[in-house]
Amino acid sequence: MSSNISKPDAIYADLEFARTADGFYDLVIDTETSDMAVIDGFESAIMVSVFSDRRANEDEVADPIKRRGWIGDLVSDVPDDRHGSGLWLYEQRRLDPRTVVGLRLEAEASLRWMIQEGLVKSVSASVAAHPDKRSTNLTIAIVEIDGGQSKRAFVIAEKTKRRSITNQS
């Protein structure tokens, strides 16, 4: 899932995640210590930010009951302070160029808080869509404050054995 490009000195240690055989992302257990594995980086921040459902706006989902998202966003003191991403809004869309752009923008928007909080210099996302294979991959690139760079890749949709699309989140 994670491939470091260059990291001078690690600043943050976090829990490690990996994709399981059934296509879900889960915590990694260190077999030597029988404890959760630790990795340098922002793994938990990325997983929660990108793969938690952001509450939809009224123009995205008309019915307030179906807008998903964290209930705490309804009572936040900060205007437009929403946790998570809107990747879920694309679950039923065709895999066309507009969907690819929308997925990229949702991923970047969900991680923008890391820049605003001074944790990283920049965050960017890219989406590789493979309509013929019915799969979609998301890559997150981070430039850290100390100059280190890293990328994380995630499968966000793929064809299943039953020939239908599943969204892995």
Image (cartoon, rainbow, N blue to C red):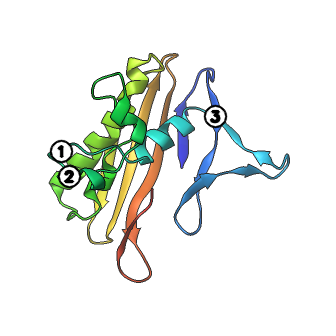
**Could you tell me residue 161's position as x and y percent?**
44, 81
Residue drawn at point x = 26 percent, y = 57 percent:
90
- The amino acid on which the numbered mark 1 sits, given as a three-letter code, is Glu
- The amino acid on which the numbered mark 2 sits, given as a three-letter code, is Val
Q: CA distance from mark 2 to mark 1?
A: 5 Å
Viewer-proximal residue among 3 and 60: 60
Residue holding disc 1:
58
Looking at the rendered structure, the secondary structure element under dot 2 is: loop
Viewer can see residue 72? yes
Q: Quadrant of residue 128?
A: bottom left
Residue holding disc 2:
61
Say if mark 2 contacts mark 1, CB within 8 Å. yes
| Pointer 2 local density, CA inside 10 Å: few below 14, some 14–19, many at least 20 | some
**Could you tell me residue 35's position as x and y percent?**
79, 46
Eyeballing the image, is 29 above or below 149?
below
Residue drawn at point x = 45 percent, y = 56 percent:
169
In screen coordinates, is 40 left or right of 132? right
**Could you tell me residue 93's position as x and y percent?**
21, 63
